[in-house]
Image (spheres, rainbow, N blue to C red):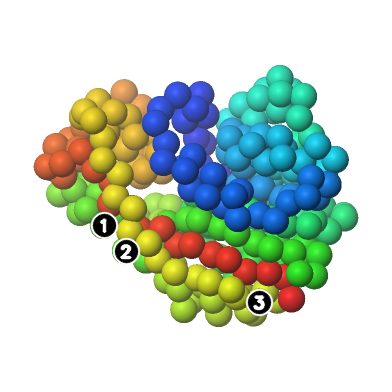
Amino acid sequence: MVHSWQATKYDEIFLPHQSWGDELIAQLPLSGGETVLDAGAGTGRDALKLAARLPKGRVLAVEASSTMLERLREKVDDSGLPVSVIEANLLQPLPIKTPVDAAISVATFHWLHDHKAVFSNLAEVMKGGAPLLADCGGKGNVERVKSAFRAATGRDPDGGRPWNFAGPEETAGNLAAAGFEVMEVRLVRDTIIFHDQMEHVAFLSTIVLGSQLESFPPEERVEVAATVSEAMGEWVVDYVRLKIRARKA
């Protein structure tokens, strides 16, 4: 089941994802004519930045969420940039016939329960030697948020549709099994501090706890997120990022 994101709100609030995407894009060795896959493109933030660096190439923006796809298509149409939108689930074989020169993914893999399948599906559509750069939630991610959610609601934050916060060893093994040469897989702490509780609650309800809050009536979700914020005692999100650099063997 694909989570139904609040795409418009996703574009309106502060997101640390921007810096994560900028970091990956800066690491790509691009000459301007490549075809690059954005795996889990969301509303197109990174896809459009990539496309601006590819005047003779293009970006394949793969996304599964219907709400994200609607917003993504609007932004691509308005941009005039070389971006092709592809509706597809990364857990399934991708409908891409010509192998791509590189792939990136920002804040997506931790929403997918089977990383071995994801890496295999990506490898199938990448050229030999093509780099894969990714940033997602890793082992130990948002433990303070999870504890506060449990305390505030009495519910298991890993229930329903759980996160998949993998560690470096597990990830390196899955990459190698899928046909990648592993360059680097590491965990990095990246705690995000918010300026006020309203901003914190908006981020919790829209980004971090969006899936967990689906079990509550829509009119109660922001109030639940506010209760979680209060239980945390600080306006923070304790991210632990899993950084991946690999290339198709």
Which circle marks residue 140 in the picture?
A: 2
Q: Position of residue 208 (x, y in %)?
A: 36, 43
Looking at the picture, does residue 168 appear above or below residue 143? below
Going by the image, does 198 lie left or right of 139?
left
User: In the rendered structure, are the residues bearing label 1 and label 2 in contact, judged by CB atoms less than 8 Å apart?
Assistant: yes
Q: Is residue 206 above or below residue 77?
A: below
- The answer to whether residue 128 is left or right of residue 164 is right
Residue at image coords 69%, 63%: 131
| Secondary element at image label 1 | helix
Q: Is residue 157 visible?
A: no
Circle 3 residue: 181
Mark 2: few/some/many CA within 10 Å (<14, 14-19, 20+)? some
Q: Are marks 3 and 2 in contact (CB under 8 Å)?
A: no
Q: Quadrant of residue 77?
A: top right
Residue type, mark 1 in image: Glu
Q: Residue furthest right?
A: 98
Q: Nearer the viewer, residue 26 or 242?
A: 26
- Quarter of the image with the C terminus is bottom right
Q: Between residues 173 and 92, which one lies in front from this camera angle? A: 173
Q: Which residue is mark 1?
A: 143
**Badge 3 amino acid:** Glu
User: What residue is drawn where x is 50% and y is 70%?
Assistant: 185
Closer to the chain start, of discs 3 and 1, is: 1
Q: Quadrant of residue 42?
A: top right
Q: Amino acid at mark 2?
A: Gly
Q: Is residue 227 left or right of residue 28?
A: left
Tell me the CA gap for discs 3 and 1: 31 Å
